[in-house]
Image (spheres, grey):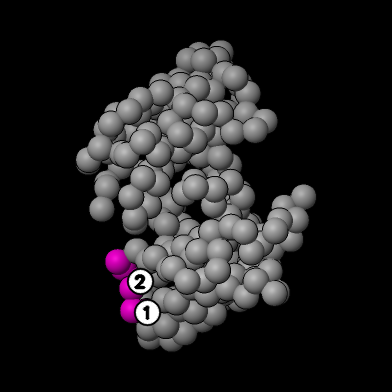
């Protein structure tokens, strides 16, 4: 099974700043089958990015994904107050599909 | 509007059983792979199982193999998760999810399962 490790565990930033979240896989993720989700307290996750870099419908362009192989990045170019949440990465290139442990983005 | 509504969660003793249901609307249910994903309190997400549109293929995470069974009824637009031999570590919110080539496009609101004596 592919293990995904997200870093940092917690990221403290201010609105307007740039956020860079990392997701590293224990083995290569085939065909960039990597997704990112945002989750707010008490809510289900929401899809942000699929295929490593494709934004889901309705997701603002301040969110971008990049990477391939074992190293992937989610970047939020300019943080808005509503962006403070937990972010999860997921690989769906090989079964069992696996998630990272999450990065909490908190207001500094 | 796509809606996935889970039911059947609750408190169960270790070794007990529970059956989760998910009612889908707003989608052509029989066209899609469906999944269950769980989240233990304060923890990350864990993919549990998925099932092919016609029910002919099912996949499970190792920790639930032999104990959980995923099934579907396309005539009723419903997904199920039969959970047997439950353990404390199965305590989690269980989300019904509609995949799209592996990533999750739609999520239910979650059903809470607590395994405790």
In the rendered view, does B1 fall on the left or right side of A44? right
In this view, A55 is above or below B35: above
User: Can see residue A16?
Assistant: yes
Disc 1 residue crowd, few under 14, some 14–19, many 20+, Cα 10 Å: few
Residue range of the region highlighted in magenta in the rendering: B62-67
Helix, strand or loop at label 1? It is: loop
Instruction: State the residue at coordinates (58%, 57%).
Output: B32
Residue denoted by label 2: B64
Q: Is residue B89 magenta?
A: no
- Which labelled disc corresponds to residue B67? 1
In this view, A38 is above or below A53: below
- Which labelled disc corresponds to residue A88? none
Give the image location of residue A45, x and y in percent: 55, 46
Helix, strand or loop at label 2? It is: helix
Label 1 lies in what chain? B
Instruction: Give a yes or no on whether discs 1 and 2 share a subunit.
Output: yes
In this view, A20 is above or below B27: above
Give the image location of residue B42, x and y in percent: 44, 52
Q: Are marks 1 and 2 in contact (CB under 8 Å)?
A: yes
């Amino acid at each position: 099974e592919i293990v995904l490790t997200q870093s940092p565990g917690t990221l403290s930033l201010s609105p307007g700043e740039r956020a860079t979240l990392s997701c590293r896989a224990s083995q290569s993720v085939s065909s960039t089958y990597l997704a990112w989700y945002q989750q707010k307290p008490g809510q289900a996750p929401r899809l942000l990015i699929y295929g490593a870099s494709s934004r889901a419908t309705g997701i603002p362009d301040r969110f971008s994904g990049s990477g391939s192989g074992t190293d992937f990045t989610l970047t939020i170019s300019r943080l808005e107050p509503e962006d403070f949440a937990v972010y999860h990465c997921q690989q769906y290139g090989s079964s069992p599909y696996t998630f990272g442990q999450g990065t909490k983005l908190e207001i500094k | 509007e796509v809606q996935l509504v889970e039911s059947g969660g609750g408190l169960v003793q270790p070794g007990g059983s529970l059956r989760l249901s998910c009612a889908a609307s707003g989608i052509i249910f029989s066209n899609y792979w469906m999944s269950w994903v769980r989240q233990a309190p304060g923890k990350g997400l864990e993919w549990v199982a998925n099932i092919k549109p016609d029910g002919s293929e099912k996949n499970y995470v190792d920790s639930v193999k032999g104990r959980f069974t995923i099934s579907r009824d396309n005539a009723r637009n419903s997904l199920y998760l039969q959970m047997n031999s439950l353990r404390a570590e199965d305590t989690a919110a269980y989300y019904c999810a509609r995949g799209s080539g592996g990533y999750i496009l739609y999520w239910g609101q979650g059903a809470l399962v607590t395994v405790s004596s």
